[in-house]
Amino acid sequence: PVKPDTIAKSLAIGTPADGFYALKVMKETGGASDDVSDDEIREAMKALAECEGIFTETAGGVTVGTAKKLVASGKIPAEDSVVLCVTGNGLKTLDAVQGRVGKPDEIKPSLREFEELIESDTKVKTK
């Protein structure tokens, strides 16, 4: 077994299932890649949550953080439209952001409690 040295544990495995094919397609299509630090992953997760309301797992942070670096380096032109696939839920990797974000609100599985939470959250943000 490979012991990951990053918070993006789902990506830091010895032989990713589609790694060979992803690299092949990237090269064949003139694509580019980069890497990101754990801090860049966390920053990307935070930006996605704040800007889009999406709490992604660390692999999604890698996707967003890498795209940001590729735009900054000019490998992706700033005026281009880009689609990023971010599919994992941040609740799967809470340990990666522990102590850096507030504790999630807990409610009973009812519409009433959900609506009350949303209403109270909206009031706090508009003050």
Image (cartoon, rainbow, N blue to C red):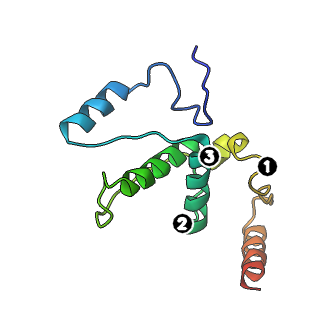
Residue at the top extreme?
A: 1
Q: Identify residue type, mark 1.
A: Gly
For mark 3, what is the residue?
39
Q: Residue at x 55, y 67 (%)?
A: 51
Give above or below for 5 relative to 30: above
Residue at the front extreme?
A: 73
* Mark 3 vs mark 1: in front: 3
Camera-side residue: 8 or 88? 8
Q: Identify residue type, mark 2.
A: Glu
**Lower position in the chain sequence, tag 3 or tag 2:** 3
* Mark 2 vs mark 1: in front: 1
Q: Residue at x 75, y 64 (%)?
A: 110
- For the N terminus, the image quarter is top right
Q: Is residue 74 left or right of residue 121?
A: left
* Mark 3 vs mark 2: in front: 3
Q: Position of residue 26 (x, y in %)?
A: 27, 38
Q: Count neighbours of disc 2 (C-alpha within 10 A) and say few if under 14, some if 14 to 19, many if 20 or more.
A: few
For label 1, the SS is loop
Camera-side residue: 34 or 114? 34
Q: CA distance from mark 3 to mark 2?
A: 20 Å
Q: Position of residue 122 (x, y in %)?
A: 72, 79
For mark 1, what is the residue?
99
